[in-house]
Amino acid sequence: MSSANSNAAPSATSSPPLFPSLPVRFRRVLLLVCGALMLGLWAMQAHPYLSVANDAGRYMVLGESLARTGDLRLLNEWSRPRDILYPPGFPALIAFWLLATGRSPGGVTLLVKATQIALLIATLPLFLRLLERARMTAGYIVAALLTYACCPALIAYANEAMSEIPFLFLCLASVVLAERPDARRPNRAEPPVLTDPQFVERSGPDAEGETISRGAEPEAREPAPRLALALALLCAGLSFLVRSAGIALLIAQTVWFWRRYGWRWGVAAALVGLAVVGGWQGRSREVIRHAPPSARYATYLDQFSLRDPMRPGAGRIQLNPKGLLLRASEGVPIYVGMTPRSLLHTMAPPRSFWLIWFYVVAIPMTLLIAVGFQVGWQRGFYLSGGFWALFWLLAAMWPWVAPRFLLPLAPFTLLYLFLGVERVSERSQMRLGWVGLRSVQALAALLLLGYF
């Protein structure tokens, strides 16, 4: 190969793209349509009030305290104790609007919610990039993005003064910036298909008749610029400062950086985790050390050991293998059912038609997510899979039970759902035929849309 050829820019047809993508104009239209859907659905629910059924009130108190005193204090209690359970990230957002507008807490509620929907819309291109890297066909990418835009749980929590949406944004941004799956990772379950965009014959001085397929050994990976990796670490650190559950991302990212990018990046990721987790825990110890004797603080470990938070007399579990296995035996089956609820948002009342509809949608959804998780792992989504599994396990081990705890996993859950749909559809087409398969898919889409 000549020097001139080696320095020349590759032609548009010299090699297939690392990841298939939609046409640029179509991508823009799709993102605009999905953004308009999100904004319209949010606007129909938006109101300038706080919910009394969740932590919105406490977040607003902490935001007001941060704006007035520069510290996290519970101003609604007579002793105004310093808080050690809620990290400062989301209260800082509330404090920003309080200081920027000079209004009372009640006057910035709608501004906080508008920021929530703006962050949610900003996740659309990130989610689209995640879908494209999964090498899904265009139809499934469009279906997944539209489902994400119409997801009732996401829209509902964009209308709450809660930390789920900013936390979701930071986690998704960190994973998309850092994760670079193999462009042509081997997939034993999928034989080479001549019409697949990943199966082409290249000709020319750079590749004489070389054949690339989805079933070939990986030859190239999408490059990861240092700036992208640094931003991924920044987003991961900020995610912990929004919700302490971000420790799952910090752990998964440290392992991934070490394995994928070398020990230097692994050490950098570990140092970021130690800085944010250690800093927050150090502050908590300092608050407890200087608290008056009458003050009592509950740490994360105290809360974790509760047997049942809804029954004060239930006692605590033992923090040993037996106690942890007991907690897992109770929490894991519950959160298997919580996985589809984290997307569907509500579960219908007992003995109602809607409850039957819920199970008709939720049970196949759970099975398809499990299939899609396996497919994603085969395609090299180790950071996404590791973060999803670790976060899910931490939620299942937490004594409080709520589907909203899994909401930050929604983009990854939908990724696995549609990877599962694609895999099952590929296997079923030979049996059902094209018309039969599309009929089943249309029925499933109508059932899901109807429940939404």
Image (cartoon, rainbow, N blue to C red):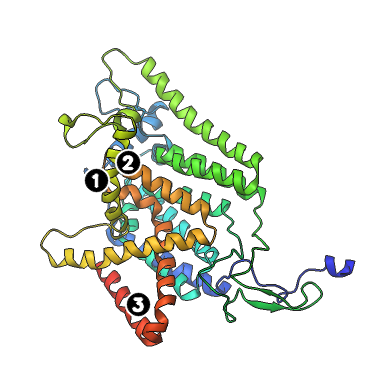
Could you tell me if the residues under marks 3 and 1 are in contact, i.e. CB atoms within 8 Å?
no
- The answer to whether residue 162 shows anywhere in this view is no
The N terminus appears in which quarter of the rendering?
bottom right
- Determine the residue positioned at 30% across, 60% down: 152
Give the crowd class for mark 1: few <14, some 14-19, many >=20 residues within 10 Å: few
Closer to the eye: label 2 or 1: 2
Tell me residue 120's x, y (percent). 42, 55
Amino acid type assigned to the residue bearing label 1 in the image: Ser
Tell me residue 124's x, y (percent). 46, 61
Q: Which residue is mark 3?
A: 441
Residue 442: name its quadrant. Answer: bottom left
Which mark is first along the chain, 1 or 3?
1
Closer to the eye: label 3 or 2: 2
Most foreground residue, 95 or 309:
309
Q: Which residue is mark 1?
A: 51
Element type where label 3 sits in the image = helix
- The answer to whether residue 411 shows anywhere in this view is yes
> Which numbered tag is attached to residue 397?
2
Which mark is first along the chain, 1 or 2?
1
- Asked if 42 appears above or below 89 in the picture, the reply is below
Most foreground residue, 16 or 200:
200
> Which numbered tag is attached to residue 346?
none
Amino acid type assigned to the residue bearing label 3 in the image: Gln
Element type where label 2 sits in the image = helix
Which mark is first along the chain, 2 or 3?
2
Tell me residue 135's x, y (percent). 53, 68
- Determine the residue positioned at 55% across, 41% down: 254
